[in-house]
Image (tube, rainbow, N blue to C red):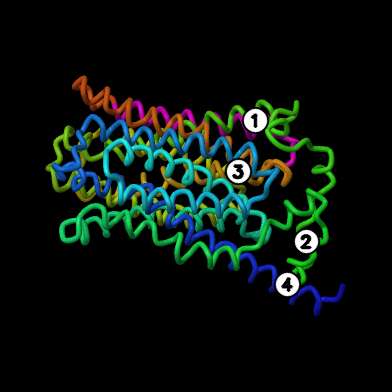
Amino acid sequence: MSSTTVQPAAAAHRRLSIRVTALCWVLVLLDGLDLFVYGATLPGVLADQDFGLTTVTAGEIGSLTTFGMLLGALAVGTITDRFGRRKLILTGVAIFSVAAAVSAAAPSVGVFAAARFAAGIGLGGLLPCAIAMVMEYAPAARKNLNVTVLMTAHQAGGALAGTLAMSVVESLGWRSVYWLGALPALVVLPVVAVMLPESLTFLLAKGKTDKARVIADRFSVPLGDFAPGPENARQPGGLRGLFTPALRATTLLFWVASFAGLLLVYGVNTWLPTMMRASGYNLGSAISFLLVINLGGIAGMLVAGRLADRFGARPVALTWFTLTGLGVGLLAIPMPLPVTYVVVFLTGSWLFSAQTLVYAAVGGHYPAKSRATALGWVAGIGRFGAVFGPWLGGVLIAGGISGWGFAVFAAAGLLGAAMIALIGRRSAGVAG
């Protein structure tokens, strides 16, 4: 093939990758908005005396949402390599959009709780499919960067949820924010349904070559770029493909790393202001640390993605988990306020992208036939950490030993690093 043919084909591939990444970025933004809107609107919901939500029930609903995300991720991890990425992405968005509308109109706390549980199922199912889709369409040299760019949408969604809550709840009531969360079903979903192609890798792996060729011709990309390699023909699909002799230990190590990563993400996000307040910082500074650590998370993902494309996702994840453990541990030591802000920012830059790099490493390690299944189960098992982290922090703080929270979360970072290190040693010679 001549260079004049290769260059337009490569340009077409890049354009298609940008399209898929941009569409999935918007959907993950909406995912983050719907996930974080509960915490952002909770003060307004609790203040609504007619609705009757108590603080105890509010905590239970938050856990119920997380449990729904766990079930959604595991369900998608089981069926996505059978039904395809696109269908399940659209289904996930439809579920959490409808659930947002039901939350807005809920006549009782019971209906509201059921809607938040359903929203969790949609939220948990979307992310693994979106990551798999972005990785499959990304050029080889940009796969990890595209995943980290995608995950900045989650942080942006959280920021948008807070902005909407601050600007809308007081004037229009807490229900208005959930109505805004339901709009994607009316506006974004039809657009994405038209513009987002199915995974070519999935279609080819399923033998649907004619459908794959139609999509490839539509976007002027070489179909051979997406053809599964010879190892995919030998690799069993679905959950069974994660437990072949070559992969079973690695699968379990990825699960533990994801548990540690999401324990950190949710535990630190939930309790950082309280722990910093207990360490002697004033209330304003303690709250501002939460904003700073999330800003660090956005910046860190972009840096991590570029480094992962150059050095590999696993080595960078190992480094990031280690630095997260050191950063969180350092926060237990009293420091001048400007120095503390720097440490919090840097810790955020490592903490959030460490978990994202787990997803990137999984996506690069497993063959296309079982990639989305692997991502779904890694995300689903990690949700146990998302439930355990906030609970553990609450237990430590309730017991008057909040200082131990820094040590526990630092240990979680080092646990994640140890699991990634073992993956690197055990996976020598395995498709990566």
Would residue 415 appear left or right of 2 to someone viewing this image?
Answer: left
Q: How far across and how far down the image is residue 359, in percent?
A: 56, 44
Q: Which residue is the site of mark 2?
A: 211
* Camera-side residue of 375 and 325: 375
- Assess whether residue 420 is covered by the magenta stretch: yes
Q: Which residue is the site of mark 4?
A: 218
Which residue is pictured at 85% across the width and 76% down the height? Answer: 2
Which contiguous range is marked in magenta?
405-432
Q: Tell me the element at label 3.
A: helix
Query: CA gap, disc 2 to disc 4?
Result: 11 Å
Residue at the right extreme? 1
Is there a contact, CB below 8 Å, between mark 2 and mark 1?
A: no
Residue 72 is labelled as: none
Query: CA gap, disc 2 to disc 1?
Result: 34 Å
User: Which numbered disc, 2 or 1, marks the residue closer to the eye?
Assistant: 2
Q: Tell me the element at label 1.
A: helix
Looking at numbered disc 1 in the image, what kind of residue is underneath it?
Thr
The answer to which of marks 4 and 3 sits earlier in the sequence is: 4
